[in-house]
């Protein structure tokens, strides 16, 4: 059944439900006649669902601040609790990416948003004094479903927008989602300030109505694109390309840093500056700043990449990240909280810019849409695993040396490697 051109679905053939058969974003006439409006509507609800997904995914970066002596969990155990959802979320990103091709972007957004009810309800009911550590591990693990939402959302929005706007659209989509890291920490701060550390379940419970709204919004306002159905060989073909794994490495440095620091920042502050932060509330007043700024600047990275080139922006950004990590290391050794915060917030900001610029590089390196979607899934999964590595690095550094200096040295070395790889593979070759 072919629909007539209208403001809602220009030149679109509706097969069933919310499926759009004819989608031509590179056609200026199609885009101006209503395509842009449809893409924006899907972008708005995609951002909201992804935002809630990020909040649920990073829920345990907040809940560990509530785990006082009554829970019998030491700092090393808390770093494990934040590493587990990062690990599960990274693994889920590949199937979530291709669920869009299999089920449709709208349909999978409904399902993936509804799945967020499981970890939220479980945490709201079960996190209380006396709960066993294995139970806490299971609760943290199922929160990982929120990490998959990012990959499916990015793959979906990538299909809606023309190449000239992909950097902006993907940056806005990712930045709005990343804000969930800061918002969940603000929610935790409000609960801590209003009720104290004895009610961790309220942090998870607050999200239940918003999850329901995300499900309803996707069902009523989003669309599926028929042409976004990927070929089954997409992952296999992408996996044979060297650039897939190089971009995955670079994405560990950008997104892996952002999400890893988002999970660990509050704990590191409490452990490294225990003499300053006597209570979780004091640390929570500061932990949201880095993720907030890092999320807000992510679209800037995409826009800069649109204008200057993704590789160039990524190259200079990794230099800035290495400098930021060096500032954090110096501040740690000097026990200077002010300088420490400046360096860490700089890391969040530059990781956000790098998130946008690296994602812009993917559709340029892989102009074929099915390969670009496959690389988004693979790089997103590997990059999210960087969040695990960040938490493991902090845990091992504290266990071995009782400070985080070893972790900071590791981060500096890795960012230097990313600088060299970006220059050798993309800048030098382009010249």
Image (cartoon, grey):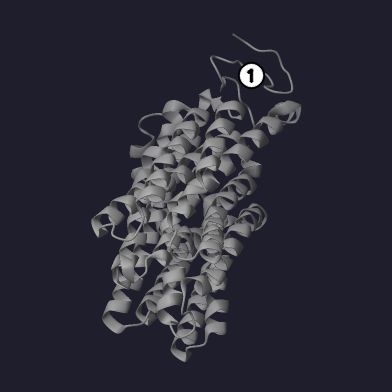
In this image, 81 relative to 307: left or right?
A: left
Q: Residue furthest bottom?
A: 334
Viewer-proximal residue, 429 or 66?
A: 66
Assign the C terminus to one quadrant of the image: bottom right
The reply to whether residue 312 is in sight is no
Relative to 256, say whether 282 is above or below: below
Relative to 270, say whether 64 is above or below: above
In this image, 7 relative to 23: left or right?
A: right
Q: Secondary structure at mark 1?
A: loop
Residue at horizontal 57 percent and vertical 72 percent from the top: 346
Instruction: List the residue tagged with mark 1.
Output: 12
Please tell me how crowded label 1 is: few (under 14), some (14-19), or many (20+) other residues with Cα within 10 Å.
many
Q: How many marks?
A: 1
Residue at horizontal 52 percent and vertical 60 percent from the top: 191
Viewer-proximal residue, 23 or 431?
A: 23
Q: Residue furthest top?
A: 1
Viewer-proximal residue, 197 or 356?
A: 197
Instruction: Give x and y (percent) for residue 297.
Output: 63, 60
Instruction: Give x and y (percent) for residue 335.
Output: 47, 88
Relative to 67, say whether 111 is above or below: above
Assign the N terminus to one quadrant of the image: top right
Instruction: Give x and y (percent) for residue 145.
Output: 39, 44
Instruction: Give x and y (percent) for residue 302.
Output: 61, 53
Relative to 178, say whether 31 is above or below: above
Q: In which quarter of the view is residue 374 placed?
A: top left
Viewer-proximal residue, 207 or 353?
A: 207
Residue at horizontal 29 percent and vertical 68 percent from the top: 73
The reply to whether residue 252 is in sight is yes
């Amino acid at each position: 059944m072919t629909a007539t051109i209208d403001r809602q679905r220009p030149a679109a053939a509706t097969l069933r439900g919310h499926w759009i058969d004819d989608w031509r974003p590179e056609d200026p006439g199609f885009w101006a006649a209503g395509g842009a409006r449809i893409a924006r509507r899907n972008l708005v609800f995609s951002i909201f669902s992804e935002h809630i997904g990020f909040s649920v995914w990073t829920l345990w970066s907040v809940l560990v601040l509530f785990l006082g002596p009554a829970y019998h969990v030491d700092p090393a155990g808390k770093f494990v609790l934040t590493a587990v959802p990062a690990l599960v979320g990274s693994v889920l990103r590949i199937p979530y990416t291709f669920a869009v091709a299999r089920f449709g972007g709208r349909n999978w957004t409904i399902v993936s948003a509804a799945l967020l009810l499981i970890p939220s309800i479980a945490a709201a009911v079960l996190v209380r004094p006396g709960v066993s550590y294995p139970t806490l591990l299971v609760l943290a693990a199922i929160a990982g479903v929120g990490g998959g939402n990012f990959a499916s959302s990015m793959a979906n929005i990538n299909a809606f927008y023309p190449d000239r706007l992909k950097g902006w659209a993907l940056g806005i989509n990712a930045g709005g989602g990343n804000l969930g890291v800061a918002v969940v920490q603000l929610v935790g701060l409000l609960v801590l300030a209003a009720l104290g550390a004895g009610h961790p379940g309220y942090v998870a419970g607050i999200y239940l109505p918003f999850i329901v709204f995300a499900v309803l919004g996707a069902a009523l306002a989003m669309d599926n694109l028929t042409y976004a159905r990927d070929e089954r060989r997409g992952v296999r073909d992408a996996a044979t390309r060297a650039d897939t794994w190089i971009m995955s490495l670079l994405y560990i440095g950008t997104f892996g840093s952002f999400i890893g620091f988002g999970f660990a920042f509050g704990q590191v502050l409490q452990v490294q500056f225990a003499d300053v932060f006597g209570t979780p509330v004091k640390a929570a007043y500061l932990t949201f700043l880095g993720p907030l700024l890092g999320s807000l600047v992510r679209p800037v990275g995409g826009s800069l990449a649109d204008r200057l080139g993704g590789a160039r922006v990524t190259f200079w950004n990794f230099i800035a990240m290495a400098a930021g990590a060096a500032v954090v290391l110096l501040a740690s050794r000097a026990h200077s909280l002010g300088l420490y915060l400046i360096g860490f917030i700089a890391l969040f900001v530059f990781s956000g810019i790098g998130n946008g610029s690296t994602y812009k590089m993917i559709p340029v390196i892989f102009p074929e849409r099915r390969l670009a979607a496959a690389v988004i899934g693979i790089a997103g999964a590997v990059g999210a695993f960087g969040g695990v590595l960040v938490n493991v690095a902090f845990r091992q550094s504290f266990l071995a040396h009782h400070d985080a200096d070893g972790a900071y040295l590791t981060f500096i070395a890795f960012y230097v490697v990313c600088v060299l790889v970006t220059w050798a593979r993309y800048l030098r070759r382009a010249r």
